[in-house]
Amino acid sequence: MLESAAVLKVGFGLGDDVRRLRAKLGIEPRNILDLAMALRRGERNAWGAKTAVERFFGQRLQKSRKITTTNWALPKLSERQVLYAADDAHVALRIYRRWRTDQPANVIS
């Protein structure tokens, strides 16, 4: 799935993830959209998930620093890590869909 050009993969700050997939697993991800870069539109700084949620939905996204700084390289993730990752993926999908509906058809890549 990660190497499929037919499946769009979206998320925030994907550069390091893509590099690790290449280096550690020999996977060449295709059709990747890093929302952090795509949404910034000429602004100096890339957007993070928190900024995107605030701007698109007018809500605050709270992310636990305790979970983000845990060891994600463990062979088995904790339930809290899995839930955090699922929430992160869900937020990216919701932001992407909202961004698509807010943009004129000729602007979307």
Image (cartoon, rainbow, N blue to C red):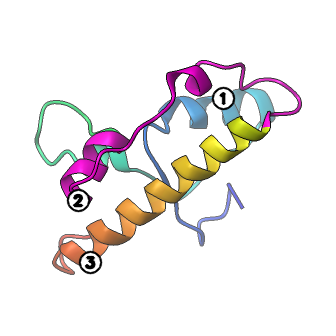
Of the residues shown, which amino acid type is indicated by label 1?
A: Arg
Q: Residue at x 25, y 60 (%)?
A: 57
Of discs 2 and 3, which sits in the foreground? 2
**How many other residues sit within 10 Å of disc 1, few (<14), some (14-19) or many (≥20)?**
few
Who is closer to the viewer here, 97 or 50? 50
Q: Which of pointers 1 and 3 lies earlier in the amino acid sequence?
A: 1
- Which residue is most to the right? 75
The range drawn in magenta is 49-78
Label 2 close to label 3 by CB (< 8 Å) = no
Q: Is residue 19 left or right of residue 99?
A: right
Rendering coords of residue 98 (x, y %): 31, 70
Indicate the secondary structure of the residue bearing disc 3.
helix
Residue bearing the label numbered 2: 56
Q: Which mark is residue 101?
A: 3
Give the amino acid type for the residue marked by disc 2 in the picture.
Phe
The Cα–Cα distance between marks 1 and 3, rounded to whole angstroms, is 32 Å
The Cα–Cα distance between marks 2 and 3, rounded to whole angstroms, is 11 Å
Q: Which residue is mark 1?
A: 20
Q: Is residue 91 magenta?
A: no
**What residue sits 27% from the left and 66% below the top?**
99
Is-magenta flag for residue 57? yes
In the picture, which quadrant includes the C terminus? bottom left
Could you tell me which secondary element the residue under label 1 belongs to? helix
Residue at 30% in and 72% down: 100
